[in-house]
Image (cartoon, helix red, strand yellow):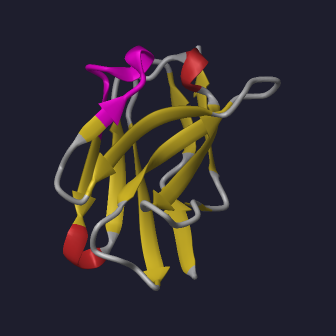
Amino acid sequence: QVQLVESGGGLVQAGGSLRLSCAASGSIFPINTMGWYRQAPGKQRELVATMTDAGRTNYVDSVKGRFTISRDNPKNMVHLQMNSLKPEDTAVYYCLYTRITAKTYWGQGTQVTVSS
């Protein structure tokens, strides 16, 4: 079992910044992918950014150049630095942990609200 705890969400003005953090605990396998999805009201959950243990990243086009994902592997943590935030970034952000042949684990979610 893997447990994920997110932090760093909140209310911010358009153009501002937030840094999300996610700490994984439990049966963590070194080779894995961690990252972030988000879900806005009435919308599908979408990938925001992922990063493998080896540093390979993937971003949704709408956040490229504004968001940066990073990992601290010894601490089993993943972060999402969000700059130049826009109202359309408003969503619940979910941390994920997954690996090949295993199930995907999700965090509880943290609310990000960007006001115009």
User: The magenta stretch spans which residues?
Assistant: 58-68
Residue positioned 40% across, 79% down in the render? 28
* Residue 58 position within the rendered picture, expressed as x and y whole percent measured from the top left: 32, 33
Residue positioned 58% across, 49% down in the render? 94
User: What number of labels is visible?
Assistant: 0
Q: Nearer the viewer, residue 26 or 18?
A: 26
Q: Nearer the viewer, residue 23 or 101?
A: 101
- Horizontally, residue 9 falls left or right of residue 44, namely left
**Residue furthest left in the image:** 54
- Horizontally, residue 41 falls left or right of residue 47, namely right
Q: Quadrant of the N terminus?
A: bottom right
**Residue furthest bottom in the image:** 26
Residue 53 is inside the magenta segment:
no
Q: Nearer the viewer, residue 54 or 82?
A: 54
Residue positioned 34% across, 63% down in the render? 32
**Residue furthest right in the image:** 42
Residue 59 in which image quadrant? top left
* Residue 42 position within the rendered picture, expressed as x and y whole percent measured from the top left: 82, 24
Q: Nearer the viewer, residue 102 or 15?
A: 102
Vertical arrangement, residue 41 with respect to residue 50, above or below? above
* Residue 74 position within the rendered picture, expressed as x and y whole percent measured from the top left: 21, 77
Residue 66 is inside the magenta segment:
yes
* Residue 20 position within the rendered picture, expressed as x and y whole percent measured from the top left: 43, 50
Q: Quadrant of the C terminus?
A: top right
Vertical arrangement, residue 93 with respect to residue 113, above or below? below
Residue positioned 57% across, 60% down in the render? 104
